[in-house]
Image: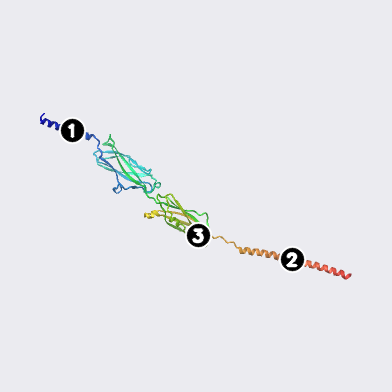
Amino acid sequence: MSKMKKFVYFVVFTFLFSNSAMLTYAQEPELGNWELGIKYIADDEGKAFVLNENGERVIQFYVHNTQMFEIEISFEYELPFEGLADGPESEKIQAGDNETFNLIIEDIDVFNFAAMSKGEMKITATLVSRAGIAVIIPENQEAVADIEIPTIHSITVDIADPAGAMNAGTDMILRVTVTNNGNIKDKVGEIDLSDNCPLMTLDNGLDKLLVTDLETDQSTNADLKITASDSHPRKNCKLEITIFSNGAMNAGNSKISEDETSITVEPPLAKPVDNQNDDDEENSVSEVVDSSLPASGIGAILLSSIMALFYAEINSKKRYN
């Protein structure tokens, strides 16, 4: 075989092999020509998405289609903390477009989890069709992000209602109870007491509440002494108490809880008049003694008269004898 024929055969073989390789490559699915991504906070994948106190958060994600054909993508969502996902089930993205979608995370009871707890959220995107034709070989992409439970400071206060009215010049004790309903250890940072009765004194015995740390769902109490002055008029007094979360104050926030009750003040109790009773008893004795004197005098007179007549009769008989 001449060198010319060998060269021709080589060129033909190379051409056929190249076309065959190109044809084979063209028939394979074009992987990697669309992209799923999450719009992270400040483009930092390490930053978690913090839920609000209602257990909700909106997260944006996107699909970038770099193909020359329309594609259809289906989505699945996996959430931590038993949350519910409200997002698109499937979307069509035109050629060259970068579409953004919203995933709403909701129905997470943040009070049931410790503050700053984290869990992974996952979005799975699956290529359904390309140019309206269902794909034979599935293409999946995943995007993940951290979801964080917020820090919730929530301390509530309850002041007991009085069992009844109080009298001027007396005092009463009311029990004050505080409870940590948040999801992190906390305590009372400040206490405000107020009433609308100037002659009522509030002996703040609630300092114990300012130094007692409360774990989640833990309660503590203290007694508040209330004194009404001797000159306090009859009145219904309104007592209000406000407490501030120490944790919220340290974080630069303000979380307060309020409660109130009504206290009825009556006039002072009447004191018994002992001197008047003694005088009455003395008068009674005197009257009895005075009323018996006439009866004693009449008896003496009658007795004297009888004795005189008796002696007179004896003397008369002696004279005749």
* Residues at discs 1 and 2 in contact (Cβ within 8 Å): no
- Of mark 3 and mark 2, the one earlier in the sequence is 3
Residue 78 position, x and y percent, is: 34, 41
- Which residue matches tag 2? 296
Q: Amino acid at mark 3?
A: Thr
Q: Crowding at label 3, few (<14), some or many (≥20) Cα neighbours within 10 Å?
A: some
Answer with the quarter of the image where residue 194 lies: bottom left
Residue 127 position, x and y percent, is: 29, 38
Q: Crowding at label 1, few (<14), some or many (≥20) Cα neighbours within 10 Å?
A: few
Q: Which mark is residue 17?
A: 1
For the image, the number of numbered tags is 3
Q: Residue at x 78, y 66 (%)?
A: 303
| Cα distance between the residues tagged 3 and 2 | 62 Å
- Is residue 134 something that shows in the picture? no
Work out whether 316 lies above or below 142.
Answer: below
| Cα distance between the residues tagged 1 and 2 | 163 Å
Q: Amino acid at mark 2?
A: Ser
Compared across the picture, whether 321 is left or right of 213 comes to right
| Residue closest to the far right | 321
Compared across the picture, whether 148 is left or right of 157 comes to left
Work out whether 66 lies above or below 6.
Answer: below
| Cα distance between the residues tagged 1 and 3 | 105 Å
- Of mark 1 and mark 3, the one earlier in the sequence is 1
- Which residue matches tag 3? 227
